[in-house]
Amino acid sequence: MRGKILLCLAGLLMIAVSLAGWNLVKPLYGSSVYAGIAVEGVEVGGRSRAEVAQLIQVWRQEQLAKAIDIYYGDTVFKIDAQSIDFDFDIEATVDEAWNYGRRGSLWEKLKNIYIAGHQGYRIPVKVKYNESKLEQLVEVWRESIERPPRNAALSLLTGGVVPQEQGRKLEVEVLRPLVVQALKKPDVSGVALPVTPLYPAITVSDIQRTGIREMLSNYSTRFNSQDVNRSTNIKLAANKINGHIVYPGQAFSFNEVVGPREKNYGFKEAMELVDGELVPGIGGGICQVSSTLYNAVLLADLAITERYNHSKPLGYVPLGRDATVVFGVLDFKFTNTAKSPVMIIAEVNGDQLVVGLFGRERPAAAVEVISLEQRIIPPEVVKKQDATMYLGETKVDKQGKPGYEITTVRVVRSAGRELKREILSKDQYLPDHTIVKFGTQIPSFVAEH
């Protein structure tokens, strides 16, 4: 009798354990999203996959018809979902809601189900968009909003002080997610552009403290203002050196002041001279600024500590008067050997770049830069085969140009008396070789015999 009772109790215990185990794992076999799970703050627990997808589809239709304002002050840009191929990723969002509590080990599943039911679990609507199109729009906004700070400086035209101006920088990395979130959220109608102020290094009070007021020298060059990208680079580099003060004994580095020639610094792609050939590159035109500055420094009788000539002659300065720069490789440097501070002034007026140096007192001596011992290097004739031309045929494919060797000298005079004569450089400019093509194709009537 006792055995039967024990057997009965054991059976009941097994049934109880089985029921408890079933109640524990029963949620794992549910046919709906688990309780407590919300998509964008809306509870979707207890809904099927299809119902969750239908709910998101309603939001999607509302948001895709929406446009938002991107603004800074009075400047406003419009953007809508279609402009960047913005859309809700319904399938990915439903998968995230459905799979919470259904992935991982048994313990992880049960834990997540419990967390969702007691603490809630929020899922954002997943979206997709064309990153390239958004990047293009951001670039347009950046060009419209950004401006470099401008140092206080002296005017080359009037000699008066031009006040400093604050610059601004668009925080692109912060902006992108703000735009995406605004297109996704029904209660957001606009985004304020995240802009950081940029402060000038030189103020009016800085100039007043130095006592700088007299022009020491100036030099001007011309450029093609119709070449928009190159003109932009010239203006940007000129603005960076404008108002820069070099104190007695201090060295000036063009690369250090102008900085990297990169798109995110505002520089554009334009033609530049590389290894003797004109090729497109970021920052084309910068060498015109460094060369114009070089000539102004020469005429102010300051010491040149680093300078390189181009591989080919240039049109905007005479032979021996250029200064090429490549960030991190070739620099233009000079030292202020005067007894007082010197300020660099760089202005662009139409198609003219003017660079001047100002100091406390007018120089008593006159400076002249002259060229000596110029030697012409004639171009060579380089012959190249052309299989499209017949034997005996020749054609000049490229007309060569001569190169030069030249010595540049600086002469300082006062009251008609020569005080100093120094050799600045002995430069060589390579010629452009003449390219002549000659035919290699055999005429058909010759080949037949």
Image (cartoon, rainbow, N blue to C red):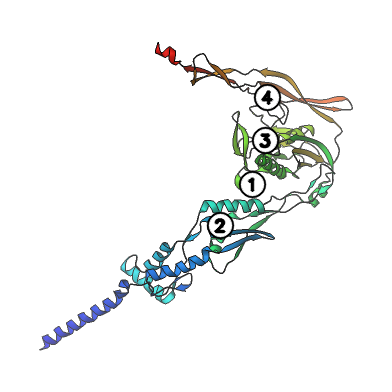
- Furthest toward the top, the residue is 449
x, y (%) of residue 110?
A: 34, 72
Instruction: State the residue position of label 3.
Output: 287
Instruction: State the residue position of label 4.
Output: 427
Element class at badge 2: helix
Which kind of residue does numbered mark 3 sit on? Cys
Q: What is the CA distance from the residue labelled 1 to the residue labelled 4?
A: 33 Å
Q: What is the CA distance from the residue labelled 3 to the residue labelled 4?
A: 17 Å
Instruction: State the residue position of label 1.
Output: 266
* Residue 326 appears in the picture as rendered: no
* Residue 15 appears in the picture as rendered: yes
Disc 2 vs disc 4: which is toward the camera?
2
x, y (%) of residue 247?
A: 76, 42
Could you say which quadrant of the image residue 382 lies in?
Answer: top right
Which kind of residue does numbered mark 4 sit on? Asp
Looking at the image, do the residues carrying marks 1 and 4 touch, with CB atoms under 8 Å apart?
no
- Residue at figure coordinates x 36%, y 69% from the top left: 101
The residue carrying pointer 3 sits among few (fewer than 14), some (14 to 19) or many (20 or more) residues within 10 Å by Cα, namely many
Looking at the image, do the residues carrying marks 1 and 3 touch, with CB atoms under 8 Å apart?
no
Q: What is the CA distance from the residue labelled 1 to the residue labelled 3?
A: 16 Å
In this picture, residue 181 sits left or right of residue 377: left
Instruction: State the residue position of label 2.
Output: 176
